[in-house]
Structures are given as C-alpha cells and as structure tokens.
Amino acid sequence: MTQGQGQVQETDERYATLLNNANAVRALASAVEGTLGPKGLDVMLVGANGDVVITNDGVTILEKMDVSHPAARLLIQVARAQQSEVGDGTTTATVLAGALVQEGVAQVTRGVPAAKVVTGMLEGIRVAASRLAERALRLDGWDDPKLHRAVHIAGREQSDIVRLVLEAGQAVGWEQLQDPAYRLAEQIVAHEKAGNEWFHGVLLKQKPLQRDWLPERTGCRVLILQDALEPDTLDEQLLTTEAGFQQYMAHRSAFMERLQRLHELGVGFLVLERGLHPEAEQFCLDHDMMVVQRVSREDIMRVCRLTGGKPLKRAALAKDAAVLEPLLGRTACVRYDERLERVRLYAPQTALSSGGSPEPAGMRRAQVTLIVGASTREVVGERARIAQDAAAALQAAIQSGVLPGGGTTELALSYMLERYRETVRGMEAFGVAAVAQALRKPMAQIVLNAGFNPLEKLEEARAAQTASASDAIGIDCDSGALLDYIEAGIVDPAAVKLHALRAAGEVAAAVLRIHTVIKMKPEA
C-alpha cells in the first residue's frame, strides 16, 4: 500500500460515521426533492397490506416511510417541527436540511474541524434569518392579492379549496388569525360523502344516542362534562345493611334531582367525556336531551370555546342552579347529519346555513369548521392535506407577511452570505460558506424538476437580481425565462421560510456533531 492510499483509507475511517449519517440524510431528502415546485410530481407510498397513499406533502411522505437509520430520523423531526409550528413548508425544510448536511460534510472532509463548521453554519443561518425577516412584505388586509396568491400556491392551485379557506378565514377574523394559539388548519375535516363547506361550529365524530327520533335541538343550553354522568359510587357491601340501602337510595334520589335541575335550566345537549348511567340515559330520552358520549378531550375543549361553557366534573352538578347556570354553554342548534354520520354543533346566534354571515361584532369565540369533500376515500386524505397547507399558509402570511417564492429569496441571501463570509475571521467562515451554498438548493431543485439546467438558470437569475437590485427575479418554470415573482404573484409566507431555515440548521448541526454511534443497552 502506498502512502497516498494509506492516507485516503485513514481519512475514510475517520469520517466513517459522518459519511454514513450524511448518506442516510441525503437518501431521505431525495425522496421528497422531486415533489418541489409547480412541476414537482407525487410520491406513491405502499403499505404492507397494499394500502396506497399518493401525495407530494413532505411530512406525510417522511412519516409514512419505513425509516430505521437514526440520523435519517432526525430529518423526519425537521418536517414534524415545521408542520407543528407553521403547518406548511415541510418539503422546503427537508430539502434545506439535506443540503446543509451535504455542504457541511464537504467542508469537514476538506479538513475543517466540525465544531468550526457548525459554529459558522449557525452564524450564517442567524444572519440569513434576520435578513429574511427584514425583507418580508406586510399585507394590506383581505383584499391584498399577495394574500390570495400565497393561499393559492399552498393550496396547489385548487380553486375550490382556496375559496373555502379564504371564506372561512374571513369568518374567523384577521385578529384571531394573528393569535398563535389558534390554528385554522386544525379545524379542517375531510369526508368522502361531503361537499366543500364551512360553518360556524364544531363537528363531532360521535353519534348521539337519540339520532333516530331526535335529530335536532335548537336554542338550548349545553352541559360539558369531563366525566361520566352517573351517581356517586358506593361500596357494594353497604347494600347488605338497611342503613347502607337507605344511603344508596338517597344517592340515587339526589342524582335524579340533579338531572331534573339540568332539564329545568334548559339543558338540551350533553357532551360527555365518559359514559352514561342507564337511568340518566332514560331521563334524557324522556326529556329530549340529546347526548353525545365518549368525546375526546380535544373536541371537548372545542365545544367549550364555541359555546362558552365550562368543562365540569360530576361533583359540580350538586351546585345550586344559580351557580351552575353560568357554567353552561349555549348553542343555536345541534343537529345530527345523517349523510356525514356526525353531529353539527352551531355557534350561538349564528346563521345555520353553510357559509353564513360572519359572527356578530364583538363575539370573541369565533369557531369554524371546514369540511373538505372528495369522490373516494383514497383522495379525500390528500384533499385534507392540501386544505391544511392552504389554511396554514393563510395564517402564516397574516402573521408574518410574505416573501418572493420559488427559492428566489434564498438565492439572493446566498450571495449576500458570500459577501458576509469575507468579514468572518477564522475557520467559521467555511460554515458560513456552507449555508450560502445550501440556500441555492431550493431554486436549483425547482428548476431541475421543471426540466432545465440548474447551473445555467441560477446564474441567469443571480445576474438579473444583481442588475435590478431585486430579490424577486426567478425562473419561469414553463418557459425557462426570467420572471419577477412578485408581479407574477409567486409568494410564500415569511414564517414558512424562517422556520424552515432555522429547523434545518438545527438538525444539520446535530448531524455534523455526531462522532460515534453507539447502540444503547435495553432498558430493564
């Protein structure tokens, strides 16, 4: 073996873990790269039992893939974090993370210490994120065409879904959509038997006990119980004595009095987290009180926000009527939808027709449900994902503004970072250079998916951006010509780009810092 061959082998062994992890990340990123951009295609996921999912949603692809490599799983966390925080841009985040790892590994294998590369990368991402936030274009209200275009692109140009999301968003209101605690995308329900619609209210999956003969109640109070509706339990041994039996009868009598009090208070709809005692069920049947049981905690909280009711425990029913009354919610109507086999609970004082007028001014609990329909069960899931992306983009654009899409902003930032790199002293500059190179990846992949040469087109776009002093110049994916993306209405929410860059940087730094992979012993 020659000296040169020995050095190569030693280098390969030194970086074996890093290269192994980088290859796994690269393989996973390549699975979603082909879906990026207007010319991107779909991925077919096939399950062990022949189940098929066809989608170009990044987080869906990554979560449903059979992935065992630990470094590759870190990349999946990027998509999950992006989905959880913003709700859109999972593919961009994944592609960026893969590019950052690839460029970082290239610097490390050149001999730059991994710690220096990571430090420089984090600095480059900090500077790029700061410049991204500064360049965001704020919106001028619901009539701003940039808002409509951002939703249109996120909704994959499906006009019926885009229109549905925009109408529901206006019903919720600009102010509430700016609240990070509210997530419009979580209010979307998909059903193969439905058409597209929205209404002021909540859709519950459970069927009411009285659906065959009591399909609707109007203008009633709502009891929300995070418990079972049943008498207090007693030790069965007490029933063997006269005193114990008397105590049991007293408990039963008190329970029936509480049910009667609910009826007198005008309770017509009961939402229970747990079950229902047979005597309570019969009482509700006799008094036309619609009951839905086994409701999830998440849906219970939605009902609370909609109706203004408080979630109660069974013991609260012992309170006096004057104390209990303010804790009850209100609804304009609760109705069992036979076609969807679900319960519709409408907001108080809201028109019952789908797509009705917005809630009255001053009403703070705006709550809508968006129903997305499709012709088959296989398609309805993808339609729901598209609607969720559109809703997330709508909310993100309102909160953070928009930026030119298609990778144009990232391309401009890459050359800005190259200039910034010249001011960085030490080997951290190589990490900044890695970020600059990785930021070109989104546009390069979009251009490649459109059938053009990325090297040629990126240089054309770069020269045009420099000449016009505009970040918005990109490539027309149909003709390959230069195009002003702002004028063409190709925009993305700024929050999507910001979070994608930061999340990608975090996982890339984690991968580059791994020196050795050790299998843990099983937990006792």
Image (spheres, grey):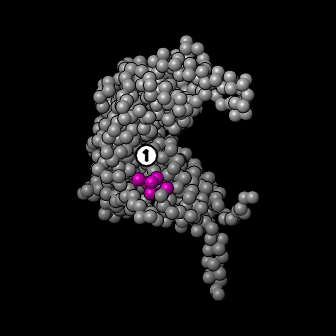
Quarter of the C terminus within the rendering: bottom right
Which residue type does callout 1 highlight? Asp
Q: Is residue 216 visible?
A: yes
Question: Magenta span covers which residues?
Answer: 56-63
Task: Tell me if mark 1 has few (under 14), some (14-19) or many (20+) residues whose alpha carbon lies within 10 angstroms of its own.
Answer: many
Residue 449 figure quarter? bottom left
Q: Position of residue 325 (x, y in %)?
A: 52, 16
Q: Position of residue 77 (x, y in %)?
A: 54, 52
Which residue, given by chain and number where applicable, does mark 1 sit on? 88
* Image side of residue 440 versus residue 374, left or right: right
Quarter of the N terminus within the rendering: bottom right
Q: Position of residue 370 (x, y in %)?
A: 36, 37
* Image side of residue 24 versus residue 114, left or right: left
Which residue is more in the foreground, 126 or 80? 80
Q: Position of residue 436 (x, y in %)?
A: 49, 54
Which residue is more in the foreground, 144 or 130? 144
Q: Is residue 168 visible?
A: no
